[in-house]
Amino acid sequence: MEQKIITTSDIEAELDKATIEHRAANFSGMTFDNLSLAERQIEYGINFINSSILGNLFLADSEINGNLNMENIAVAGSFFFGRGKLMGSLNLRNAAVGQTINLVGLNITGSLLLAGAHVFGFVSLAKAVVLGDINCQRLETKDLTRDDLTIRGDFYLKSAQINGSLDLSGASISGMISLENALIRKNFIAQNVSLKDNIILKNSLIKEGAIFNGVPAEKIIH
């Protein structure tokens, strides 16, 4: 049976109802076309558990006062949540994203979970601030080719600030990992990471040390 695609009016009705009832908006298991909630103030969190988005998910410059739970979400296009603020944690565990994750400049007061996610194209946390931990265990990025243009499956944390730990254990990255100018206040764990290019650590500060077991020394660029 073909699943109903949620309309804009359905989305707004649930957001309004959630605000009145002082709870997270619940879009779990629902199907959307393109979804834009850019430049919005969301009073509580949002659940997109097991949801499907047939196009792009766009949350640029929005502030969400709660958790954003996107576990097992499938996004055919890209996920953009740049320059916004999330007063909680972002859960992308086992997410499948067809065209990049871009969280440039995002401020997250909780943690970021990308464990087991599959992404075509890059994952960017450039200039982002994460007050908790980042768990990217078993994250997989692959190059994205569209119309003779290839977007590398890089993992960017250039100029990011992470107050907790960054764990990429068991990740498979088809490009590079860039921590240039990044600050990690706890550990950087990169055990048994498979990557096509290098780990760039130029001008980074990792206060409690890094673990690179299983990563060839020549791929670590200081």
Image (spheres, rainbow, N blue to C red):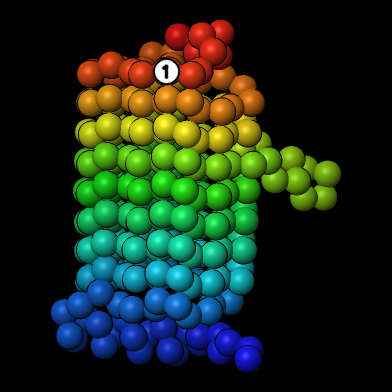
The part of the image, by quadrant, that contains residue 48 is bottom left
| Looking at the image, residue 76 lies above or below residue 177 | below
Can residue 196 be seen at all in this image of the molecule?
A: yes
Residue at coordinates 48% horizontally, 65% vertically from top-left? Answer: 73
Name the residue tied to disc 1.
Answer: 212
Image position of 191 (left or right of 41): right
Image position of 101 (left or right of 20): right
| Looking at the image, residue 27 lies above or below residue 146 | below
Image position of 18 (left or right of 71): left
Provide the secondary structure element on which disc 1 rests.
loop
The part of the image, by quadrant, that contains residue 205 is top left
Image coordinates of residue 42 in percent, x first then y, are 28, 70
Image coordinates of residue 168 in percent, x first then y, are 42, 33
Amino acid beneath label 1? Phe
Image coordinates of residue 147 in percent, x first then y, are 82, 50
Quarter of the image that includes the C terminus: top left
